[in-house]
Image (spheres, coloured by chain):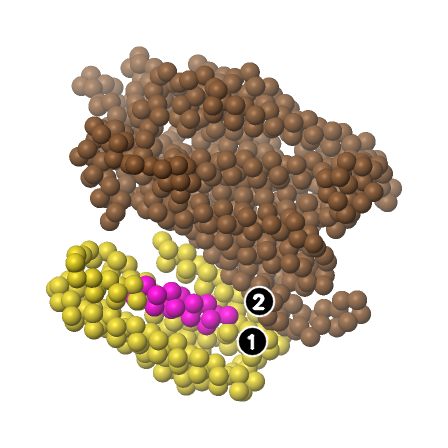
Amino acid sequence: MSSEATLQHADVHDAHHEHHHHETFISKYVFSQDHKMIAKQFLVTGIIWAIIGGLFSVIFRFQLGYPESTFPWLEDLLGHWAAGGKLKPEFYYALVTMHGTILVFFVLTAGLSGTFANFLIPLQVGARDMASPFLNMLSYWFFFLSSIIMFTSLFVQTGPASGGWTIYPPLSALGDASSGAKIGMDLWLVSMAMFIVSALLGGLNYITTILNMRTKGMSMTRLPLTIWSLFFTAVLGVLSFPVLLSGAILLLFDRNLGTSFFLSDIVIAGKILPNEGGSAILFQHLFWFLGHPEVYIILLPAMGMSSEIISVNSRKPIFGYMAMVGSVFAIAILAFLVWAHHMFITGLNPFLGSAFVLLTLLIAVPSAIKVFNWITTLWRANIRFTPAMLFAIGFVSLFISGGLTGIFLGNSALDLHLHDTYFVVAHFHIVMGVASFFGMFAGVYHWFPKMFGRYLNDTMAFIHFWITIIGAYLIFWPMHYEGLAGMPRRYYDFSGWSSFNMFSGLNEFISLIAMIVFAAQLLFVFNFFYSMFKGRKVADTNPWGSNTLEWTTPINPGHGNWPGEIPEVYRGAYDYAKDGKEFIPQNVPIGDDESKAH
Amino acid sequence: MGIGSLMMMFAGLTSAYIVKRNQANWLTFDLPSFFWYSTAAILLSSITLFAAEKMFKQRQIIKYRTLIITTLLLGVLFIFFQILGFKVLSENDIKLTGNVSYSFLYVIVIMHLAHVVGGLIALMGLFAKSFSTKIMSYNIVPVELMSTYWHFVDVLWIYLLVFLIMIR
């Protein structure tokens, strides 16, 4: 196999390793097969998408915060979609749809696990590259292709897809249903098919690398928790994305070839459609069979990275390593068994519903174990409040706040009232959206020195952190109250209902904070690109005093990661504060007089 | 793992089929006999590929080449019979846009067919490679990958066939 051949090659010629690659600009930065470069490609593409997706939310927050006002600059920006400076309802919904699609798939799936699985797996398990660097490169380029298609759909005459990010039929299956169900919807489906191919290629590679390419001594129980969580993330992706693919294929058939998988007894504008025998609920089953594991595809990498960062910056071993691994495993299994809790109001058999309630509430157990372990790790620790650490702690805070409301929503009796209200919006934004973003930020702040050989600016990082965490709570906390009062999500304008009029001030406040938080993210983006070129240079190979293998490589590792032999591993990743030593890296052999603790 | 992922996709499709079956407007139909011929073809092709792998290990490259091309031809035959089968179906007014049960039959079989075509392309690659005279690589990995994939597609077809006959 070619990767093995490269390995031996690299081992033999270790001294001149980097000179053996005559890399051109194209092979180094564009069609690179180096996992570190591919990770950076995922990260930068993810950042671009995050700016677009974030901007969309700011634009539709203008509509929600100031439904009566007009903004002439909106017309300059969006043309006929905001004629007269006011968003059109169709385009409002398109923005909401694309905001969800972009953030869930392109940023928090590809941008998060694409970046960190690629970057950290070979470095932390001690491999020169992925099992198949070529497939890895393909994975990025399928993602790129998918991005281009989705981006193109923003500019078509009838607008991008607008049926909500869950694209439920019949709205998404019938071109005549709305302007956002025309060509934009087809592009959405094709783009997502490409995205799934990318996710599968990536996932297969991650799993194979973790199982087969670990360095000598790196048993599964010595793996850092980042790797464990990325492993289960990949397993979830590989097993759940294909089901969405089959749903998307059936939907494409319904849209373009006249089949009726999801359609039955439909009347549009007085005209009866010939479609008969299909079931819209069927699509919901197929969608949520991916959709729920997807939540954990987003969340698990953030959990793993936060565990690692919290332990490093607490200068303490992670509390309950095996319990952490076990609970990630339990979450991964349960993730496949709870999808119908998104469908309590679809007329689901109440008995079946109660089974899903039970399974859903069971997730609270491994989640609580993880929270307990994070807090216990922090307990009486010698904490270093680096920006990465702040974001990791922020992740734990958001995971608790958002997770608790999940217990409300998981009860079918309560969910009947709360379904499709702002309570749901608040819940999943905190627990899945913002929390995962915090995990991602923590990861970027922590591993930026390894990625680019420079530090991010700390002052900007602290400003970024405090505005984001306070802002996130200010935005989403009030939404719980709106949701409890029954305010439905996805609506364009609430001013027509006297019962929701009392929230107009609150909506304006939320919109205002959303803009401030978005500005803080732009500060991060500036910090990111500025520090990439002008940041303070890293002088020490192990700036955080961390035990994991990525810090045994040179400051700017070439393709192949280690110039010499791959280090051998003698211990787990969490030997902090042991035998009077602050930390003992994994490649340090066990001493004769070393205690057996930890 | 790739196979796991494919299995999930077809599991998704077939479970959708089961869900739909219990609802109204579900029509049953008999599969044309051509589907049985195509089954025979793909079963045979698995056997020839198995033999090819064995010959490759014994470095009998001529026999290997013949067996690979036989497998390929049997694969083409499989597709040919399936197309004939669909012709019979559409003559009996069983069409993609008709009843949902027909739509499912078409989509499931076409998705499988797409995977067979993918396998045929890979087989062509192996066949072409077996002619390279300069360097004969006896790397078994591509052949093993090919045969795992092909046997999987074969077993998948048997599963789908049994599924389509039993569950209606």
Q: Colour of chain A?
A: brown
Which amino acid type is shown beneath numbered disc 2?
A: Phe
Secondary structure of the magenta portion, mostly? helix
**Total of numbered circles in the picture?**
2
Q: Secondary structure at mark 2?
A: helix
In the image, residue A310 lies at what x, y percent? 45, 24
Spatial separation of the CA atoms under disc 2 and disc 1: 9 Å
Q: Residue at x 62, y 61 (%)?
A: A281
Instruction: Write down the residue under mark 2.
Output: A253
Residue numbers of the magenta segment = B107-123
In the image, residue A97 lies at what x, y percent? 65, 48
Q: Chain of mark 1?
A: B
Which chain gets the yellow colouring? B
Instruction: Write down the residue under mark 1.
Output: B96
Rate crowding at label 2 as few (under 14), some (14 to 19) or many (20 or more) other CA atoms within 10 Å: some
Name the residue nearer the viewer: A341 or A38.
A38
Q: Is residue B98 visible?
A: yes
Q: Residue at x 39, y 81 (%)?
A: B81
Q: Is residue A459 above or below residue B166?
A: above
Q: Chain of mark 2?
A: A
The quadrant in which residue B120 appears is: bottom left
Q: Is residue A332 above or below residue B131?
A: above
Q: Are marks 2 and 1 in contact (CB under 8 Å)?
A: yes
- Quadrant for the C terminus of chain A in the image: top left
